[in-house]
Amino acid sequence: MAEKKAVHAPYNFIPFSDKNPLLPYASMEELPAHDSIRADLKTGEIHITLQAETPIFVSDGSKAPDGKQNLHFFRLPNGEFAIPGSTVRGMVRENMQILSFGIIRPGVDLEDQRMFFRDVASSSKSVSANAKKYYNAVLKTKTKIDPDTHKNYSSPENVCSGYLYMEKDHYLIRPTKHIYYRVSRKHPDIAALGEQYAKVIPVFFTAGDEKVKSISIKAKAIPGEHKGMLLYTGKAASKIANHVYLFPEPDFDAPEIMLSADDVLSYKVDLEQRENALKGLGLSFWELPKNDGECKPVFYIRHNGQLYFGMSAFLRIGYPHTVAEGLPLSRRDRKISADTPLDFPHAILGYAEKDCAYRSRVSFGDFPAEPGAAECKPVSMILGNPKPSYYPGYLKDGKDYTETDFQLRGFKQYWLMDVQPTGVDPGKEKVATTIRPLPKGSVFHGVVRFQNLTDVELGLLLWSLRLEEGCCQSVGMAKPYGYGRMKLDIEKLRILNFEVLYGADFGASAWIDATKKISNFIHQYDAFAVKQFNPAGSNSITSIRELSDIQDFFFIKSEIHPGTDTSYMALNTYKNVRTPLPTVKYLREKKNPPPPKVASAEDLQALMKKFSFGVK
């Protein structure tokens, strides 16, 4: 039973190292210029072959006319299937960040946002218990007795009701004249309307003693009736039918509540992240009004200086801390300027800021497939899009975004696995994605060009591409189902020979074949990093391969999982997991236990003194 309560996922995390970022340049002024090729630096080409060990899919970005995710493989203008250079560049950049302990910039490398959440169903023994406690405190959730069924129900006392208006390109909320009414679907007037979800219906109603007596849909009210709106929320996750909410008309004499730009942006970002989950009921129901004067009933609450609103009484609110607050202090809030020390990824692959920019010294060409490549039959699947909002997976030590000392786990990486079966349950077709991958065995060739790199920088670039023996790269979409496992081979490394290039021997080649020196370049980078981390006169490590997070990285890039313990969890298990996602280190050492630690001579001497104390 305990195993079923543990978190599992098709991804895991390489920890953000406790080592400080390597900063090879003190400022932008030290970077090599782009308008000349320096003889003391390396300029050349890396010829690469990528071979698919599982079917591979890289989207061309197009959609079907009906808007469905019906995708084809990327093609070059000449019609050849290819992996875009930008895809390979993104892969290399993250590898480079891990191998060089690079800076993580909020808003660039990491979305710095305040995650929204709702938590009404978590078990008190689950890892979500603390977040549920915070949520109920903010909403001031109390237990009440339903006047119709005489059963207990939860009521969010701090949540108000109103109408969200769009007026002259801004948004405002007008409170209702009275608080909203909670109406059972068994109410005769509601039952007569049949099953409804994610819908708003104008009505007339009568009420008394905080209870709705009658509801009618007609052109004109009779004496004693009031105008209102029936709000049918989306389908509940449980089998119990959710209630309907009746909103009285707006109070035009009450002060308007203006929404700030941050309030609106936060809602839009959260809605965008939930788009796939809401498509089945019609996304427009949750969208903001689009036309001047248009309105819709909403619930709202003020907390910590922000206004939260939505289409459910138990609405989604923001955590007290943003995602980027979980970064290690050594990597947080580093703004790049002309006089800022630079790490390897930014120095090699470039960056762009408002006040300064530096172009990449490495260019990635496209990787065309070998002739004869053809798409496989269409495959449909539900593509999960894991988000930092799921803290049992994304945060360390079972903490959540309500705690001041929470820490992000690190760089998200997908496990390597063979292709897993996919399917789309009836009724889920609207959120399915159909892809047309190229088959296992497909081969792609491309060239990576570099200019004015030091030997150390070239070593890091080569290592980020080749990795270690037995490692694979992950490319393209559908990685959670095993697609895109690629074997990368460096076929040739060639470097410009300046003596020949500027010499008198016009028949000689201007290129030096340095393919056999690849390992030597990688060693030079490794030696540089070791020197930075070892205290003066110390040999605490001889290679950064000895560091736990680097071992984790190469483990997740080489371990082929069966897929049974690396799948997404079923929806009904998310809320009640008992333990957070196990670390890569735990899984690595479980499979390959570290050798027993050998006591040093100093430890043995200390032990002997301990047991010989007082002995003559």
Image: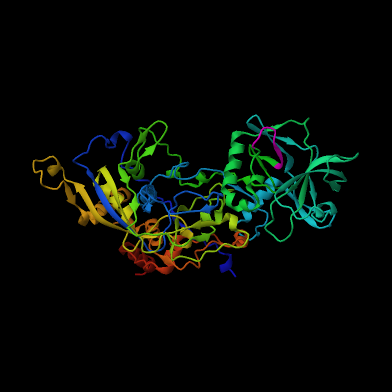
- Nearer to us in this view, 301 or 2: 301
Residue 295 part of the magenta segment = yes
Q: Quadrant of residue 487?
A: bottom left
Where residue 515 appears, as percent x and y from the top left, is 22, 55
Q: Quadrant of residue 445?
A: bottom left
Along the horizontal axis of the image, is 153 left or right of 480? right
Extreme-right residue of the structure: 223
Where residue 330 appears, as percent x and y from the top left, is 42, 44
Q: Is residue 540 visible?
A: no
Where residue 126 appears, as percent x and y from the top left, is 61, 60
Where residue 281 appears, as percent x and y from the top left, is 66, 52
When the figure is inspected, residue 485 is found, relative to residue 312, above or below; the finding is below
Along the horizontal axis of the image, is 310 left or right of 415? right
- Nearer to us in this view, 552 or 221: 221
Along the horizontal axis of the image, is 305 left or right of 341? right
In the image, the segment drawn in magenta is 290-299
Residue 173 part of the magenta segment = no
Figure quadrant of the C terminus: bottom left
When the figure is inspected, residue 31 is found, relative to residue 575, above or below; the finding is above
When the figure is inspected, residue 304 is found, relative to residue 423, above or below; the finding is above
